């Protein structure tokens, strides 16, 4: 396997490489290309002055351009005709070719060539230095005039040598500083990441008392915030998992114990007492039914959450569906005086998975039955909200604390963590409701007022 460096070394390495690249850039342009750049700048200055001269219409303006160029850019200009000098710049910089150099071959060569412009690089006969000359024919006057714009090419070899020596020291200093600065920068950046990594390892071992510390780096702060949130959610999930295991074990153990006890009683004590034996058998059947409901709810929740069963949409009457569900509770109306209030009469056609939506409404009504008040009243309402259908199931119980509302959809979540065997259901009902509604992409929620009751709702989107 390829050997990996830690973050500290990687940051340090790239900062050093960056410093070296900067130094290479300096050496390249300050030493190797300095001479070429110098000549390019000189040529550019000559061409700019020559362009202004060629466009000048008056002699006064021409003189101003010539003297301004000589003063500001060390450029000498001479205007001649075919035989003699007409005008030259007043300011004479070192290396200028003017006046006494009239007979130098380049002038007669250009005049005889009939070219509009030519560039020469010659040796100044007076100063023995290289001089760059740009010769051009002036077409903006009535006379045959010529302009010779020239500037001295100063030798820069000594300058380059000085720069080389200077860059050697600069390189050494910059490399030393880069090593030191890169070390501290890498330590500054990597330290919070190393701490986060260490905390994450502890989190993997289910140590939830850790905290992912923040730093002065925005991205690391965002990572720490995300991991702190993940830690809290994992802690809740782990706690719910333990509760689920305990509660499912409780719900399985109790009926199994009762089944075994009543089966033994039927075998050992009832003898030929048919009435007593039938009573014991009925209890066994009830507990088996409870076990069946529990197992079915667990299987349903597992299927819905894993999307094993796709939704089967069909059009049906929501009012009729609710009325059919309410018929199942006739025994509670007759024996325990429960009141179910549902006033909608007109058909409301919707398009959804009828079986799964039936389970949603059934589970929400079961939940309302378990937690409604002493009046034993459960209300079902259907409202039209902006063209969508809102279904509400309302109880008159003690309500839910605001801090508990975000968790009521979790499996086996109970107020104050007190699990009990429900009158109806298994404790998985709201988790199944949540999964089915999210599968339909329906909005859902709960509104609760302490000591006045709770309203569970979901909104069916009209297609």
Image (cartoon, grey):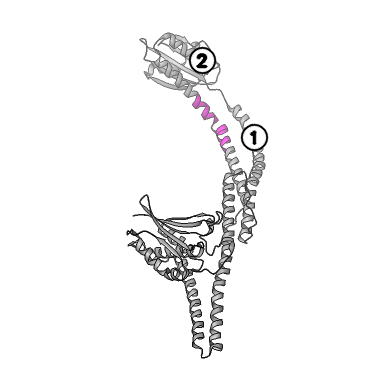
Asked if residue 193 lies in the magenta stretch, the reply is no
Q: Give the residue drawn at x 60%, y 40%.
A: 19
Residue 371 seen in the figure: yes
Q: Extreme bottom residue here? A: 272
Q: Position of residue 126 (x, y in %)?
A: 54, 15
Left or right of 163 in this view: 37: left
Tell me the quarter of the image containing the N terminus: bottom right
Residue 312 seen in the figure: no
Residue 107, image quadrant: top left
Q: Position of residue 11 (x, y in %)?
A: 61, 47
- As drawn, 58 above or below 358: above
Q: Secondary structure at mark 1?
A: helix
Q: Position of residue 235 (x, y in %)?
A: 59, 59
Earlier-in-chain disc, 1 versus 2: 2
Q: Which of 342/309 is in front?
A: 342
- As drawn, 456 above or below 97: below
Residue 217, image quadrant: top right
Mark carried by residue 246: none
Q: Give the residue drawn at x 57%, y 61%.
A: 415
- As drawn, 31 above or below 242: above
Asked if residue 35 lies in the magenta stretch, the reply is yes
Report which residue position mark 2 lands on: 70
- As drawn, 144 above or below 282: above
Q: Which residues are magenta?
A: 24-41
Q: Which of 282/445 is in front?
A: 282
The 10 Å Cα crowd at callout 1, few under 14, some 14 to 19, many 20 or more, is: some
Secondary structure mainly formed by the magenta segment:
helix
Report which residue position mark 1 lands on: 170
Q: Secondary structure at mark 2?
A: helix
Q: CA distance from mark 1 to mark 2?
A: 36 Å
Q: Which of 48/430 is in front?
A: 430
Q: Position of residue 445 (x, y in %)?
A: 47, 55
């Amino acid at each position: 396997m390829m050997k990996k460096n830690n973050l500290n070394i990687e940051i340090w390495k790239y900062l050093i490489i960056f410093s070296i690249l900067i130094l290479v850039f300096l050496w390249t342009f300050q030493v190797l290309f300095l001479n070429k750049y110098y000549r390019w700048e000189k040529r550019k200055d000559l061409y700019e002055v020559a362009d202004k001269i060629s466009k000048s219409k008056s002699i006064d303006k021409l003189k101003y351009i010539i003297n301004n160029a000589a003063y500001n850019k060390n450029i000498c200009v001479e205007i001649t005709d075919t035989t003699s000098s007409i005008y030259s710049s007043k300011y004479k910089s070192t290396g200028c070719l003017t006046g006494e150099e009239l007979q130098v071959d380049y002038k007669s060569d250009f005049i005889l060539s009939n070219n509009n412009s030519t560039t020469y690089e010659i040796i100044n006969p007076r100063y023995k230095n290289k001089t760059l000359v740009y010769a051009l024919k002036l077409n903006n006057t009535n006379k045959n005039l010529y302009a010779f714009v020239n500037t001295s090419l100063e030798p820069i070899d000594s300058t380059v040598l000085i720069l080389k020596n200077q860059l050697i020291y600069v390189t050494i200093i910059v490399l030393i500083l880069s090593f030191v600065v890169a070390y501290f920068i890498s330590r500054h950046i990597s330290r919070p990441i190393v701490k986060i990594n260490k905390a994450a390892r502890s989190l993997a071992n289910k140590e939830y008392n850790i905290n992912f510390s923040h730093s002065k780096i925005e991205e690391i702060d965002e990572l720490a915030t995300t991991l702190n949130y993940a830690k809290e959610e994992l802690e809740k999930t782990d706690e719910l998992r333990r509760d689920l295991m305990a509660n499912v074990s409780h719900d399985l153990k109790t009926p199994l114990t009762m089944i075994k006890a009543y089966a033994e009683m039927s075998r050992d004590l009832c003898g030929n007492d048919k009435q007593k034996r039938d009573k014991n058998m009925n209890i066994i059947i009830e507990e088996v039914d409870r076990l069946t409901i529990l197992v079915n709810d667990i299987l349903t929740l597992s299927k819905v959450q894993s999307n094993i069963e796709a939704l089967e949409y069909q059009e049906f009457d929501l009012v009729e569906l609710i009325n059919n569900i309410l018929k199942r509770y006739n025994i509670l109306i007759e024996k325990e005086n429960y009141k179910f209030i549902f006033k909608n009469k007109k058909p409301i056609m919707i398009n959804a998975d009828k079986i799964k939506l039936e389970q949603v409404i059934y589970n929400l009504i079961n939940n309302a039955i378990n937690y409604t008040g002493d009046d034993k009243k459960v209300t079902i309402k259907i409202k039209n909200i902006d063209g969508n259908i809102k279904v509400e199931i309302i109880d008159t119980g003690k309500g839910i604390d605001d801090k508990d509302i975000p968790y009521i959809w979790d499996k086996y979540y109970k107020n104050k963590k007190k699990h009990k065997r429900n009158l109806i259901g298994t404790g998985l009902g709201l988790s199944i409701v949540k999964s089915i509604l999210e599968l339909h992409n329906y909005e859902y929620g709960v509104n609760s007022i302490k000591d006045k009751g709770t309203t569970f709702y979901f909104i069916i989107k009209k297609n």
